Amino acid sequence: MRKEDISERLRTTDPVTHEPGLSETEVHVMRRAILAAATDARHAGWSPWRLALAGTLAFTVVLAVFIGTVFAPARPASTGPQATPRQLQFETPGGTRVVWILNSQFDLPKDRQP
């Protein structure tokens, strides 16, 4: 089946092509209803008092975080023992094993340094 055959078949079997369109009065009634709905609808944007409230709230949150960090009590440095490295192991059903060593100091062992 060629492309022209399909487009011709679609045109001939389309039920909308055999229906009458809207009359001029129906078109004008529909247009008036759409225009009336558009003019009656309120603007979907933020009103000025909502913007002011959102700005005040954001400023209050930023101020609270800033005050909390400035006046936070100083924490003494930890003098406890160094954390031992932790390992995470994963084994596949085929027997492959992967071992990750998690180092909280972010330094490489002497034998792994470049």
Image: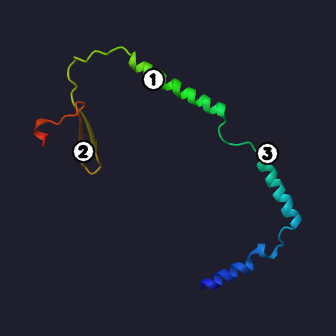
Q: Quadrant of the C terminus?
A: top left
Per the image, label 2 sits on a secondary structure element best described as: strand
The earlier-in-sequence mark between 1 and 2 is: 1
Foreground residue, 102 or 71? 71
The answer to the question of whether label 2 and label 3 lie on touching residues, with beta carbons closer than 8 A, is no
The earlier-in-sequence mark between 2 and 3 is: 3
Residue 71 pos. (x, y %): 40, 15
The amino acid pointed to by label 1 is Val
Identify the residue shown where x is 78% and y is 48%: 39
| Image color mode | rainbow
Residue with the mark numbered 1: 65
Picture layout, residue 81 above or below residue 92: above
Identify the residue shown where x is 56% and y is 26%: 57
Cα–Cα span, label 1 and label 3:
43 Å
Foreground residue, 34 or 2? 34
Neighbourhood count class around disc 2 (C-alpha, 10 Å): few under 14, some 14–19, many 20 upward: few
Residue 69 pos. (x, y %): 40, 20
The answer to the question of whether label 1 and label 3 lie on touching residues, with beta carbons closer than 8 A, is no
Identify the residue shown where x is 82% and y is 73%: 19
Residue with the mark numbered 2: 98
Cα–Cα span, label 2 and label 3:
66 Å
The amino acid pointed to by label 2 is Val
Cα–Cα span, label 1 and label 2:
42 Å
Per the image, label 3 sits on a secondary structure element best described as: helix
The amino acid pointed to by label 3 is Asp
